[in-house]
Amino acid sequence: MAVANKESALWRVAKDPVSRRKLLAVTGGSTALAAFLAACGSDSDSTTTMATSGGGGKSGTEKFGKGDVGILNYALTLEYLETAFYADVVKSGLFKGSDLETIRKFGSEEAEHVTALTGFVKQLGGKPAPKPKTEFPLKSAKSVLELAATVENLGAAAYLGQAPYIKGASVLSAALSIHSVEGRHAAALNTLLGESITPDGAFAKAAPASEVLKSVEPFIVG
Amino acid sequence: MSDQILVQPELADVHIDVDSDDLSRSEVILKGALAAGAVYGAVMVGPFVGRALAMSESGDVGILNFALTLEYLESTFYREAKTRAKASGDLKSLIELVGRDEDEHVGALTETIKKLGGKPVAEPKFDFPYSNTAGFLKLAQTFEDTGVSAYNGAAPQIKSKEVLEAAGSIVQVEARHAAAIRLQNGEEPSPVAFDPALPEAKVLKAVEPFIA
């Protein structure tokens, strides 16, 4: 409920163009993120055909395990990252009241994804990926919010990128179910920042694993 | 249905009509999906749709036609809302944005069905039960949540990887719409971490009346 509150301090900052420019300067410091954002630029030609990259080739998640286990472990790594990020944000003291509640809620949903994905990997006889050590730049409420939006938009694109490679129907169902939750988080954060809820237009873009992993590299320290 | 306590009663009052006599399978499934949503809540729509599409054995074209029927519903809903919802400010812009996206989904699904050698379903007529901004917003939220659940339920039935990826790129946009509309309603953008899995027996019970 918290996010909708347009009277919140966060919302006012988000709507202020000066703060927005400052924030862009801050987040521009991360080259990987900047590169990712450029790669995901909204250059959709809005045609009426459903352009796809197809499901051929490799998922790019082989280093996390074979087949669906690899994909699930890749997703698990990203969910660990998101969970740790929100936990750090809660601890940072940058947010209060309803904004803090929203962050807690998103964080708890990511933690549920971690649990579910871990269970799935085990069910398939795989070994769950280890929790990565992470570090995030938490300078101001505004920059944190922008980073959160970037991470969630990236997460949604990452799930979309894996969907065509998933073999098991129940794994696909679970991944799709998480995918749309990531999309909801992304849109809510974009709304707070005064950004478009659908930055890719009417058709969301998928991100390949290589691109996603490169983007999150700066936050993984061990 | 009138004896039952409805979780999402507004769905029970949505009417879908076609000009021709032969009600298409897609419309039957959509009517069933809305009924399942009315009785059990939007979370039931996905399992219902997945089961119904699996039973209808109409392949990717059938699934795309179901999606097209759903997008026709949404597209008509937002087109009407531009005047009927009496919206202003942020909500007015949101209605325009979402409406544009749904129109693009209709166009893309129509083209894709043709490309696969199928025949796109005709646009049904819809009747939406609301009379003010609040009523519009309530229905919009239910439709978007229903849409997300429906696509998530349908997607695992898709055979072609290309069609699956395309459906995925649409459902993410529906999820984004759902979050934005929920914020307008002062509701949590993502009420649950997952679409809950429902027992097969419950799903079958809901599906049976609608699938001949």
Image (tube, rainbow, N blue to C red):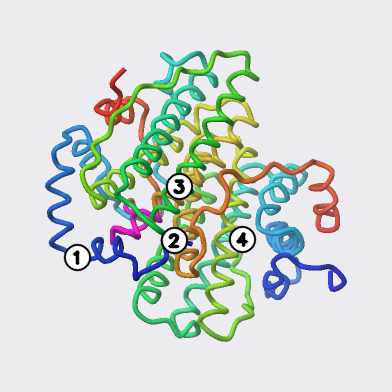
Q: Is residue A57 visible?
A: no
Between circles 3 and 1, the one closer to the viewer is 3
Q: Specify whether residue A202 is in view.
A: yes
Q: Is residue B122 above or below residue A40?
A: below
Of label 2 and label 1, which has the lower sequence position?
2
The chain that hosts pointer 4 is: B
Tell me which corner region of the image, top left, top right, bottom left or bottom right, holds residue A28: top left
Foreground tag (4 vs 1): 1
Amino acid type at circle 4 is: Val
Question: What residue did someone put label 1 on?
Answer: A16
Query: What is the chain letter for disc 2?
Result: A
The percent position of residue B173, horizontal first and vertical second, equals 44, 53
Task: Specify the subunit that label 1 lies on.
Answer: A
The residue drawn where x is 49% and y is 57% is: B189
Q: Quadrant of the C terminus of chain A?
A: top left
Question: Is disc 3 surrounded by few (<14), some (14 to 19) or many (20+) residues within 10 Å?
Answer: some
Q: Is residue A185 magenta?
A: no
SS of the residue at dot 4? loop
Magenta stretch contains residue A197: yes
Residue A33 vs residue B120, the one in the foreground: A33
Could you tell me which residue is drawn at 34 percent across and 70 percent down? A7
Disc 4 target residue: B121
What secondary structure is marked by label 2?
A: helix
Discs 3 and 4 carry the same chain letter = no
Q: What secondary structure is marked by label 1?
A: loop
